[in-house]
Structures are given as structure tokens and as C-alpha cells.
Amino acid sequence: FDHLARPGDAAILHYSIASAAIFRVLDRCRRCAVHYHNITPAELLWRWAPRVALECAVGRRRLGELAGRVRAAGAVSAYNAEELEALGFPEPAVLGVMRSPLPAAPRPPSGGGPARLLFVGRGIPNKAQHHLLLASAALRDAGIDHVLDLVGSWGAARAYEEHCRTLAEALGLERHVRFRGSVSDVVLAAHYAAADVFLCLSDHEGFCVPLVEAMAAGLPVVAYASTAIPETLGDAGLLLEEKPPSLVAEAVAETLVNAALQARMAAARPERLRATDPEEFERRLVAFVEAIP
């Protein structure tokens, strides 16, 4: 790892999982700051993704070691900044996430047919795709014709993918759920443009960029109010304090037909999108770097 840093260098450590490189750079650099991206609690991962769970467990345990060794700390959300503060990092700054907007994609003409639901996120237990499948079954049982597109790679948790595919088959969701896998930015933008509702039931998010992408695409959002999701979404979506399948199905059904609810979400989007604009992130990051003692 010696090529990563030379004695006397300065560095911003982007911390999101266990990494020997982080601590080698920390040992060699004169001035270091940390930008914390979030680590999923291992207990959400052990059953279906044990290798990732182990890396997360070690990463969360070692995060506290940075508290007395970096000169400044930042986080992608206030939720994660509170975690840093609890570990002894002084006054962590909320910086946000560096992201590039997706390419523009025209919305296809409305031709009736099933409602299009979308979730974007890697296939991993904390993203709770299994709960999305249960919600799809509840929608089907309520007589609501729909298609749920699951976009994202399953490479980190093949056992969880098998579990979800088996669950979808057991629930009889062959007509309703599509496992899309990893896609290009152009195809991803097309999925957002074609969707009617973005549905997120994730149990742990440090920020959740797909929520921002959904808002940018003008999508109504139904989301489980866990971790940093309320902070990211604000009033631009319908937040659920619980997520039994029947309640999720009712929330989705209401969002599809309630024009006033859709208008409320649309009115709140501009403020949320301004807060996550790449130029705003750049301004906060420059100020953070310039203030490193």
C-alpha cells in the first residue's frame, strides 16, 4: 500500500467498510480527514451475506479508532454525522454525496396497462427486496395490476438472490416482478422515466441516492422511514413508520390515484433536490477542505 501515500501527504479518507488501505494512508499522512459514507449493521447481513457482514462488522468496530487521529470529520447525512459524534468525532460536518445526474430520458406515452413500480439498489438483505416481494403479493391480492422492477446487482449476496427468487416463485409473482440486475445509466434513466411509483422498504440507508434520482425523475415515492430515508426524502414522499405488506400495498394504491398526494410530493421536490445538488455538495466539500486545521 505504500504507493497510496507518502509521508507528509494530506488525505481525505472515504470510509464505508473495512479497509487496510485506510489505516496505511492514515499512518503515512500528516493531515487526514474522514468522509464517512455509512456502514450497514452486520446483524442485517449475517444470514444471507456473511462475507459482507464480516467486513461491515470490522469496519464499524474500527471506525472509532479514527476519532482521535483525524483533524476533521464529515458524513453523507446528519444520520451518519450523529453516529460519528457518538464515537467521539468532534463536530462532524454534513457534506452529502458526490453524484452525477442521470441522462435525460423521455417518459413513454401512457397507454394504460399495469402500474409500474420501481426499486433501485443492490441485492443485499438490508435493502429488503424480500419485503418488496411481499408487498407485491399484497397488491396482487388486492386486485391491483402492477409490475415491480428490481434494478441492481446481486453479486455481493448470491444466496440472498436465490432466496428472493424462490420467494417470488412461491408467491406466484412471475407476472408481477422482474429482476433486472445491473444496468447502464441510460437504461436506469429509462426505468425511472417509465415508472409510476418508486417503492423503497430498505432497513438501513446512510443517504439513499436512488431516492434523489426518483425525485429528479418526478416520481412519487413510498418509503419505509428508516435511518436516513426521512432526512433524504423530506416531504417529497409518503413515509411509512411500519411496513406490513397490507399497509405498503394500501400506501402504493393511494399514491397511484390520489392527485392531491401526488401534488404535495411534487411541491416538495425542488427544495429536496436543491439540497442534494452537485454544486451544493461541491460548495460544502470545498469549505470542509479549507477548514481542515
Image (cartoon, grey):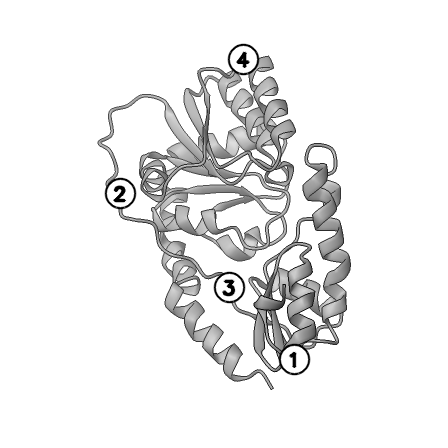
Instruction: Tell whether 107 sits left or right of 265.
Output: left
Towards the viewer: 119 or 260: 119
Mark 3, secondary structure of its residue: loop
**3D distance between C-alphas at marks 1 and 2:** 43 Å
Q: Are marks 1 and 3 in contact (CB under 8 Å)?
A: no
| Disc 3 and disc 4 in contact, CB within 8 angstroms | no
Which badge, 3 or 4, is on the more N-terminal residue? 3
Across and down, in percent, residue 127 comes to 59, 39
- Alpha carbon separation for disc pair 2 and 3: 25 Å
Q: Where is 45 relative to 230, above or below?
A: above
Question: Which labelled disc corresponds to residue 71?
Answer: 1
What residue did someone put label 2 on? Answer: 105
**Front position in the image: 75 or 173:** 75
Which residue matches tag 4? 172
Kind of element beneath mark 1: loop
Q: Earlier in the sequence, mark 1 or mark 2?
A: 1
Q: Earlier in the sequence, mark 2 or mark 3?
A: 3
